Amino acid sequence: MDTTVTSTSQSAIELYYKGLEEGKLKARRCKDCGEHTFPPTGCCAHCGGWSLDWVDLSGKGTLLFATHNISPACHPRFEPIAPYVYGHICLDEGIIVQAIVQGVKATPEDLNQLFQRGQTPVEADILRMDDLPVLAFRIIR
Amino acid sequence: MRNRLKEEIVISGVGCSRFGDLLETPGLKGLSLQEVTANAVREALDDAGLSGQDLDAVYVGNAMVHSSQLPGTYSQLSKWIGAELKSGVHFDAQCSTTNVGAALAAMSIASGVYDTVLVVGFETTRTKVKGFSPYEREALQHKETWLWTDMAVNQAYGVPQGYDIFSTYNGLVALGYCRKYGLSIEDYDKGMFELCRTRRLHGSMNPKANIQQTMEDKASELGFSSSYEMWQSDEVNPFVAWPSRLMSLVTIADGASAMVLTRADIARANKSQPVQLKGFGISYRDLPWYDEDPTLWDFDRRSATQAMEMADIKATDINYLHTHDCSHISGICTAEMIGYLPSGKGLAAARDGELRYDGKRPMSTHGGRHAFGHAWAASAGSDTYEAVLQMRGMAGKRQIPKRPEISVIHTHGYAMIGTTIVLGGV
Ligand SMILES: [Zn+2]
C-alpha cells in the first residue's frame, strides 16, 4: 500500500488547455500497455494503469461524419458561433474524438455535400473562444 | 460476475404521474413536486396493496437537483408517503435512474436483507423553484435545462469544447446509420416521420402522455395539407442536427414514477398481478459513446446481454420492447442490436406499421420520449409502468392485442449508462 502524497501539483485538465493555447494536443501514453489516453487523465483508459508519459499528438485525422448543432447552443460559451458543424473524427493515432469542424457552413446543403464526399482528411485548428482555447478541426482541401 | 439473482423478485406495484408541465398541464398544475411524487407512490402502493409502513427501504432518484431543489429526498418525502423510520437513499443514474433503482432493490431483496423496497424517480425539466417559494414554480429556460442536464456529461473536456447532445446523439448516429445500410437521406427522413407518427399515435391513446395529439391532427390544426408536409416544414420541424429533425427528439417534461419490488413468495398475497423482474444489466461509458461506427454502442450491447443472460431469454422471446428514444434513431439502433428488429430494417418496420401497438413488433406504446415525454429520473419508471400495464392487459385503447409475456426495457442514463431490464409473467 502506497500512502505517499502525490507530488504532482498541476491538473491534467489545466495542462491540456494550456497545451491547446500553444497549439499542442497533450495526451498520455501508458507505460504498461502503450495505449494513448486522450484527452488526458491520470489513469490509462485501456488497462487502468497509473504510470503514464505525456506525449503530443499529431493533430491529423480523418473526418468520418459531420452534422451540426442547435442554436442557441446548449452551452453559453458557444452562443457566439452557433449553429456550428460538429464532427466524428478518427485521429491518425487511432483515437476517436468529436469536435467542432471549422470552415464548413452549418446548412443541410453543405453538410449533405460533405456526407456524399465521404471520409475527409482534417487537421487540428484550435478555436479561441473568449475564455478557453478549444480543440477544433479544419478540412485539408 | 455471477450475474444471477438468488431469489425470484417481482414488481408488485407501479405508479406514474402524467408527464407534462407543473405550471400548465392538467393533473400536474397547482401541485407541488412533493405531491406529484407522492401521488405516483400512492398509486404504486395501492397497486401492491401496501402502505408506506410495509416498506423496508425507499430508494429515491432525481437527476437535476438544480430545478427540484430537493436533495436528501428519502427524508423530505417520507411524511408525504407515510414511510418514516425506514432505510433510504437518494441516488441517480440520470435517465436510467428508476430502472437502476429496480436492479438495486432486487439485489438488496435477493441478498436476504430486505423484503419490500419502494423505488421512486421524479424530475422537473420544464419548471424550477421560483425564488425562495416553498410552492411557487416558474418556467425553466431552454438554456438552463441543457446547461444543468449536461452537467452529467464529461465536464473536463466534452461540454467545455462544444459537445452537443443533438449532434452526438442524433445527427452523427443518423449519418452512420445511412452510410452503413446505404439508406438515402430522403428515405431516412421518411422513416423518421413514420416513427414519430407511430409514437404520437400511441401518445394520443395515453391519458398520461405529455403530447396527446396525433401528427395528423397537429398538421390540420396548423393548416398543412398533409402531415408529411408539416414534417418537412423548416418552421415546425427544423433540422436540429442534420439530418435529424426536431420531432425526432425528446420532449422535456415534469413527472414522477414509482414501483414496489418484493419477494415473489410474499407478493402472492398482494393486490394486483405481480410481474417478475427476470434480469437486468447495467453498463456505462464516457464520451465518445461509440467508436468508428456511430450505430454500435458497446455499453448497450453489454447491458442487454447481461440482462438477457440473467433472464435466460433470447431476442425471439421478446413480445414488447422499449428502447431509450430520446433520440429516435438511437432507439432504432438499440432495438436492432438487441435483435428485436432486423439490422438496417428498423425504419422500414416503422413505415410498415410493425412498431404500432397492434403491429408485429410493438415498441414504446406509451408514446416514448417524444410523445409520453421525458422527465429524466422518472422516465425509466414510466417505461416499466407501461410494460406492466401491457403485461396485465390494462393498457386501454393502446393494449397490445396478445398480452406480452416477455418485455424488455432499455434506457440510457446520461452520459451514458445503458440499462436493460427483462420482465416476465410470474
Ligand atoms: Zn494502459
Image: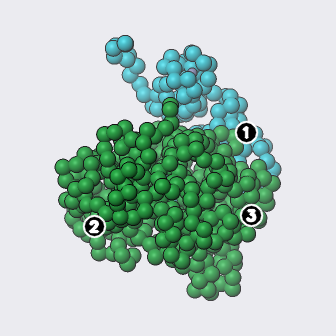
Chain colours: A cyan, B green
Badge 1 and badge 3 both on one subunit? no
Subunit bearing disc 2: B
Q: Position of residue B133 (x, y in %)?
A: 22, 65
Q: Chain of mark 1?
A: A
Front residue of B352 and B142:
B352
Q: Residues within 10 Å of mark 3 (few under 14, many from 20)?
A: many
Q: Quadrant of residue B346?
A: bottom right
Quadrant in which ligand 1 is drawn:
top right
**B251 up-or-down from A60: above or below:** below
Of circles 1 and 3, the one toward us is 3
Residue kind at label 1, given as amino acid type: Thr
Q: CA distance from mark 1 to mark 2?
A: 53 Å
The chain ID associated with circle 3 is: B
Task: Quickly name the residue at label 3.
Answer: B348
Q: Is mark 2 within 8 Å of ligand 1?
A: no
Residues at circles 2 and 3 in contact by the CB criterion of under 8 Å = no
Residue at horizontal 63 percent and vertical 81 percent from the top: B216
Query: On screen, A2 above or below B232?
Result: above
Q: Residue at x 32, y 66 (%)?
A: B46
Give the crowd class for mark 2: few <14, some 14-19, many >=20 residues within 10 Å: some
Q: Position of residue B5 (x, y in %)?
A: 45, 40
Mark 1 lies on residue: A62
Is residue B416 visible to the viewer in this orientation of the structure?
no
Residue assigned mark 2: B35
